[in-house]
Image (spheres, coloured by chain):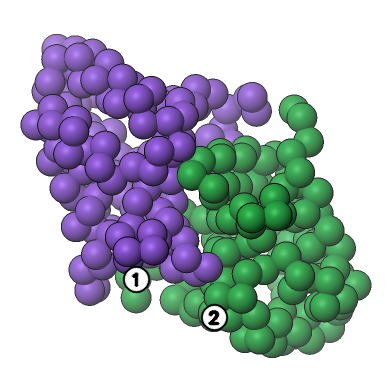
Chain colours: A purple, B green
Amino acid sequence: MHSHPLRQIIESCDKAISARDFDSLMEHYSEDAALVVKPGMIVKGKDNIRKAFIAISDYFQDQLTVEQGDMQVIEGGGTALVIMETVLRFPEDLRGDTEITRRATYVFRKEMNGRWICTIDNSYGTSLLDTEAV
Amino acid sequence: MHSHPLRQIIESCDKAISARDFDSLMEHYSEDAALVVKPGMIVKGKDNIRKAFIAISDYFQDQLTVEQGDMQVIEGGGTALVIMETVLRFPEDLRGDTEITRRATYVFRKEMNGRWICTIDNSYGTSLLDTEAV
């Protein structure tokens, strides 16, 4: 599998989350991006997404690590759909589980300057349909 | 659940497919859209997508019907990610199965005039990761 430029962007986002470098992280989001914090809870806009990431990081006492597995990218119409295996790890004393694997879906938009920016960050993928529609 | 404008668009696409009205169908796709025909096979551009839909319709001898179930829409950065239960039905004499349910992922882009057009049509959703990466 060839490494897609979007894989590098997503990996640098993961590193930024682990390092609590929220300035670097937010450079990869569009002003009016959407983040699915959990099923039924979507936050919009860079400021709110930043706050959500800080809250998530605080909740996990900075011990959350995010790692990406298999990835498929479909590009079309100036957008890209990334389908990606995402592994979340956190210490056992905070929760029963230490590892959660999800199939995430991310939407990126190609800017005029050729840069990809994230418009929709949905780490829950199609499992959103498991929950009540909101 | 409120009916999102994108649900109406997707439903009119399904009707167009059933009616072999490929002109109406293609009005909802961007010029450089991408369609996942099957895992590992992506076609790009309106002409190729149109041909793919005609081939699919011919294969099923015009007896394929597409119906949508539960739906979640996430909007952000001028794009929308639609996650949708899709039920495909076709006569039993063509295949062993008569009904297949998928969790599809569609990406739409909002045009300057406010219209939503499909940029990525991936009815396989995150199940693309079940197959070998291509």
Q: Quadrant of residue A1?
A: bottom left
Q: Which class describes the residues within 10 Å of circle 2: few (<14), some (14-19), or many (20+)?
A: some
On screen, A57 above or below B10?
above
On screen, A83 above or below B65?
above
Residue lying furthest left: A19
Q: Secondary structure at mark 2?
A: strand
Q: Which residue sits at x=13%, y=27%?
A: A20
Amino acid type shown at disc 2: Val
On screen, B23 above or below B130?
below
Q: Nearer the viewer, mark 2 or mark 1?
A: 2
Amino acid type shown at disc 1: Glu
- Which numbered tag is attached to residue B43? 2
- Which numbered tag is attached to residue B132? 1
Q: Quadrant of residue A110?
A: bottom left
Q: Which class describes the residues within 10 Å of circle 1: few (<14), some (14-19), or many (20+)?
A: few
Q: Secondary structure at mark 1?
A: loop
Is residue A12 visible in the rendered structure shown here?
Answer: yes
Q: Which residue sits at x=54%, y=80%?
A: B43
Q: Which residue sits at x=38%, y=59%?
A: A111
**Disc 1 sits on a residue from what chain?**
B
Q: Are marks 2 and 1 on the same chain?
A: yes
Q: CA distance from mark 2 to mark 1?
A: 18 Å
| The C terminus of chain B - image quarter | bottom left
Q: Quadrant of residue B26?
A: bottom right
Residue B132 appears left or right of A107: left
> Upstream in the sequence, badge 2 or badge 1?
2
| Foreground pick, A107 / B70 | A107
